[in-house]
Image (cartoon, grey):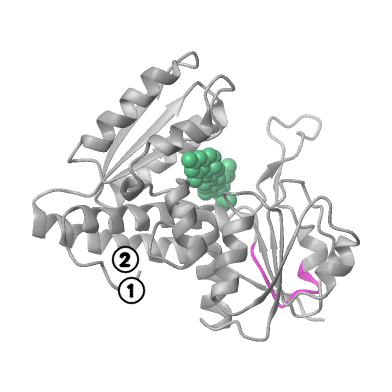
Amino acid sequence: MATAALIDGKAFAEDLRARVGEAAAAFAQATGRKPGLAVVLVGDDPASQVYVGAKGKACEAAGMASFEHRLPADTSEAALLSLIERLNQDEAVDGILVQLPLPAHLDEQAIIAAINPDKDVDGFHISNAGRLAVGQAGFVPCTPLGCIMLLKDRLGDDLSGLDAVVIGRSNIVGKPMAQLLTDANATVTLAHSRTKNLADVVRRADIVVAAVGRPEMVRGDWIKPGATVIDVGINRLPPEPGKEKGKLVGDVAFAEARDVAGAITPVPGGVGPMTIAVLLRNTLVAAHAHAGQPAPGGL
Ligand SMILES: Nc1nc(=O)c2c([nH]1)NC[C@@H]1CN(c3ccc(C(=O)N[C@@H](CCC(=O)O)C(=O)O)cc3)C=[N+]21
């Protein structure tokens, strides 16, 4: 089998960001203000600091306003809820993202439930989860929406007749991913840690989406020849001797899978950049709804 085509999420994300940037400029022309995203980070987890910084920069590069709120690790639930209430009321804020995971003393479900669903650009609020489940318009979580965009770009909008296996049943990736694939007419299996004979289940799949958070768990001999493989995992391996940082790898053993698959996303440079681009896209959509403007097309 020839080497798989690389699905260049980074390039796709750059293109999406450019289109969002143009639409954001038109929005600013029409309304006299930029679309605005508030990002809330509680605590000082270094990886989260990096992601939050990247989101702020991406916003500004797309002509959006970024409002960062960095709170100490011991912030009380009442203080966080009162910040969210203030952001819900703030006319300059179209989207609100509370970086997860939160410190253990904070109840994630209660915090997310406090966000106005119309500003929930992460798509984590139960109203948005429910809208996705029943086919109503709402915000879809950024990572699975980015994955379905990559899949449709490659395979077309209609996935009729294709078998898709999603590995991982999280509320943030696996479950919404299975719903989006179902909506696109794929025949979907949602596999997880209790699935029997996972390798055999994956071997049937024309589309594999791996979102388990276990480095290189999906092996090359699990992949059906020609399948399209979307690797959501971003795992940092322990550093090799003499190195400061370990290598970033996905949930798929990339070098093995590349020899079998028809197309595969790399890590880094695959799904990760799509997540941020879709966040900007969702913020732009939120801004239009908030301002009573018609939804931007083609995004
Ligand atoms: N409320 C909330 N919403 C999120 O969307 C959210 C979150 N919390 N918590 C943390 C995760 C993680 N996340 C990533 C986004 C982009 C990359 C990304 O762009 N990664 C690059 C490289 C990263 C690197 O080099 O370290 C890539 O895969 O090519 C990764 C991870 C969003 N998250």
Q: Which of marks 1 and 2 is nearer the N terminus?
A: 2
Does 32 lie within the magenta span?
no
Amino acid type of disc 1? Gly
Mark 1: few/some/many CA within 10 Å (<14, 14-19, 20+) = few
Amino acid bearing label 2:
Arg
Q: Which residue lies furthest to the top in this view?
A: 74
Name the residue located 69 percent from the left edge and 43 percent from the top edge: 235
- Vertically, is 238 above or below 233? above
Question: Is the Cβ of the residue at disc 1 closer than 8 Å to that at disc 2?
Answer: yes
Answer with left or right where residue 93 lies relative to residue 210: left
Provide residue 283's location: percent of width, then percent of height. Answer: 32, 52
Residue located 81% across and 31% down the image: 241
Residue 85 circle label:
none
| Local secondary structure at mark 2 | helix
Relative image position of residue 127 (x, y in whole percent): 43, 51
The magenta segment is 258-265
Q: Mark 2 points at which residue?
A: 19
Q: Where is residue 100 in the image (x, y as percent from the top left)?
A: 52, 35
Residue 160: in sight, yes or no?
Answer: yes
Looking at mark 1, is its residue's CB closer than 8 Å to ligand 1?
no
Instruction: Look at the numbered disc 1 and give the secondary structure of its residue.
Output: loop
Q: Classify mark 2: residues with Cα within 10 Å, few (<14), some (14-19) or many (20+).
A: some
Quarter that holds the C terminus: bottom left
Horizontal arrangement in the rendering, residue 274 relative to residue 25 (left or right): right
> Which dot marks residue 298?
1
The answer to which quarter of the image holds residue 183 is bottom right
Residue at position x 83%, y 64% in the image = 256
Q: Nearer the viewer, residue 126 or 163?
A: 126
Residue 225 x, y percent position in the rendering: 81, 79
Q: Nearer the viewer, residue 195 or 202?
A: 195
